[in-house]
Amino acid sequence: MEEDFVVYREGVSGWEALNTVPPGIRLLLGIDGSLTRTLEFIGCGPVTVEMLPPPSPDSRLVNLCLPNLGPVVQALTRIPTPISPEDREILQDSQPIGPALSKKKGH
């Protein structure tokens, strides 16, 4: 499974979209694999997921939301094809990707 981060802000994409983002927030955007846990500590509460229309059938696009703040980060997850029924469940799961994967593995 591959997770991509797309940097985009009001008509600006790529690295230039980060020029005016404070360093602490840029650090959050670069975290690989534990963004949900970090957001939980920063927001002092559980992260919820707002499902968005995916750009392709092999992907999942979500807003990660914090209590009292709403959406703070958009995350795109892609699963290589062919997609198994279990992987399709993960793409449609309304939990952050870590808990969705743990549920799949029976943890």
Image (cartoon, rainbow, N blue to C red):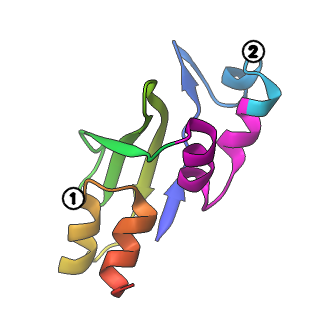
Q: Main secondary structure of the magenta part?
A: helix
Q: Is residue 12 left or right of residue 93?
A: right
Q: Residue furthest front?
A: 44
- Compared with residue 17, is residue 63 higher up or lower down, i.e. above or below? below
Q: Residue at x 71, y 31 (%)?
A: 25
In the image shown, does 43 or 52 lie closer to the viewer? 43
From this viewpoint, is residue 16 visible? yes
Q: Residue furthest right?
A: 23
Q: Indicate the quadrant where residue 80 lies.
A: bottom left
In the image shown, does 104 or 45 lie closer to the viewer? 45
Q: Is residue 19 left or right of residue 28?
A: right
Q: Which residue is mark 1?
A: 92
Dot 2: element: loop
Kind of residue sitting beneath label 1? Gln
| Label 1, residues with CA under 10 Å away: few <14, some 14-19, many ≥20 | few
Q: Where residue 17 sits: x, y (%)?
A: 66, 22
Kind of residue sitting beneath label 2? Thr
Which disc, if any, is residue 20? Answer: 2
Q: Residue at x 23, y 79 (%)?
A: 86
* Magenta-highlighted residues: 25-44
Q: Is residue 36 left or right of residue 94?
A: right
Q: Indicate the quadrant where residue 48 lies.
A: top left
